[in-house]
Amino acid sequence: MGKLILLFTVVPIVELWLLLSIGDVIGFWPTVALALGTAVLGAALGKREGLKVLAAWRGSMTEGRIPDEGLTGGLLVLLGAALLVTPGVLTDVAGILLLLPPTRRRIAALVRERLERRVAASAAGFGGAGPGAGAFFSMRVIDFGGDGRPDGPRREPAPGQVIDVEAEVTDDDARGEPAQQSPRRLPR
């Protein structure tokens, strides 16, 4: 949380200082034109690269294979376009880097690697069971609150009321042997 606060306070101050410095060198109107030009460029590049990613996704899906760039690439295109539309020098540089395919692919690989490490670390902390150490549970809550939202106010189910839950148990035993299953009950 502290990093976000620092990001949202320091970056705008640095951006303002850079814009004022550029304005001192090239003048007010050229600086405004530069800011508007990068916004238009960001919108155009974002649209072009986004359509390329979407076309690659569609082509991969019709061939029955996983898209090369994945969801991360599409999100980075969206973030890059948003950064270019935002006035500022640092955000423009970051936006251009995210929209250029070679740097976007490298950044996407780094993001994917970091997410995989976080997922592996959280799976290891989940009940002491990590990869190869037993069973992993995943559940999707349909509606506990009664108001159509999974995060709504909790209440006790009425007698005889059905709580609809989808659950999956997968075995990650490295030896390929099925894990010993014991009956499990959901807490009330």
Image (tube, grey):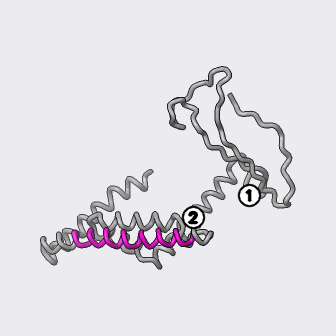
Task: State the mark number for residue 131.
Answer: 1
Q: Is residue 112 toward the left or the right of residue 134 in the image? A: left
Q: Residue 17 bears which disc, if any?
A: none
Residue denoted by label 2: 114
The reply to whether callout 1 and callout 2 are in contact (CB within 8 Å) is no
**Residue projecting furthest to the front:** 62
Q: What is the quadrant of residue 37 in the picture?
A: bottom left
Across and down, in percent, residue 174 comes to: 81, 60
Q: Give SS at disc 2.
A: helix
| Residue appearing at x 46%, y 73% in the figure | 104
> Which residue is depicted at the point 17% across and 69% down?
32
Label 1: element kind: loop
Q: Looking at numbered disc 2 in the image, what kind of residue is underneath it?
A: Arg
The residue stretch that appears in magenta: 35-61
Q: Quadrant of residue 36?
A: bottom left
- Where does the C terminus fall, quadrant-wise? top right
**Left or right placement of residue 170 versus residue 151 in this view:** right
Camera-nearest residue between 13 and 89: 89
Q: Main secondary structure of the magenta part?
A: helix
Q: Is residue 168 left or right of residue 2?
A: right
Q: How many discs mark residues in the rendered view?
A: 2
Q: Position of residue 55 (x, y in %)?
A: 47, 71
Task: Looking at the image, tell me whether mark 1 or mark 2 is earlier in sequence order.
Answer: 2
What's the distance in space between the residues labelled 1 and 2, CA to CA?
17 Å
Residue at 34% across, 65% down: 83
What is the crowding at mark 1: few (fewer than 14 residues within 10 Å), some, or many (at least 20)? some
Count residues near mark 2 (Cα–Cα under 10 Å), then give few for <14, some for 14-19, many for 20+.
few
